[in-house]
Amino acid sequence: MIDNPAQAARLLDKLGPALPLPAYVTPELAAMLKAQAPNADIPAECLVIAIRDGGDEAGIVCKLAFGAGITKAVYASITHLRFDPRLPVGKDIVKYQKRRIKRLRQSAG
């Protein structure tokens, strides 16, 4: 099991009331978005406007808002985003991300 279900549930409980949350797009996510929409300008910042538990497969999934530049719905795993650690939930997010990334690497062999 990649995610600790209790940890993910606690984080989801904290994230819900904190929405919308400002976030930064990782280079990997920006590259994926650019591949899907070559003519779109991919901003470095976005807002997390909704969250959902994607289970072990996807982890915590975030619905993103980019403003006028990108009109289609964009969803990404929380591990593909960076957050200001000074946010009230910032440290909790970073803790979840580090654990999930570590477990993903372990499961890949």
Image (cartoon, rainbow, N blue to C red):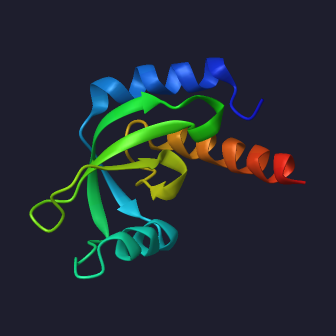
The picture quadrant where one finds residue 42 is bottom left
Q: Nearer the viewer, residue 102 or 74?
A: 74
Q: Quadrant of the N terminus?
A: top right
**Residue most toward the bottom?**
39
Image coordinates of residue 78 in percent, x first then y, are 48, 46
Tell me the residue at 27%/58% (across/down): 46
**47 vs 56: above or below:** below
**17 vs 32: above or below:** above
Tell me the residue at 36%/76% (across/down): 34
**Residue most toward the left?**
68
How many labels sit on residues?
Answer: 0
The picture quadrant where one finds residue 68 is bottom left
**85 vs 58: above or below:** below
Q: Quadrant of the C terminus?
A: bottom right
| Position of residue 102 in the picture relative to residue 79 (left or right) | right
Image coordinates of residue 17 in percent, x first then y, are 29, 24
Image coordinates of residue 77 in percent, x first then y, are 49, 47
Tell me the residue at 84%/46% (across/down): 107
Q: Nearer the viewer, residue 36 or 23?
A: 36
**Residue most toward the right?**
109
| Position of residue 99 in the picture relative to residue 89 (left or right) | right
**95 vs 35: above or below:** above
Tell me the residue at 21%/55% (across/down): 72
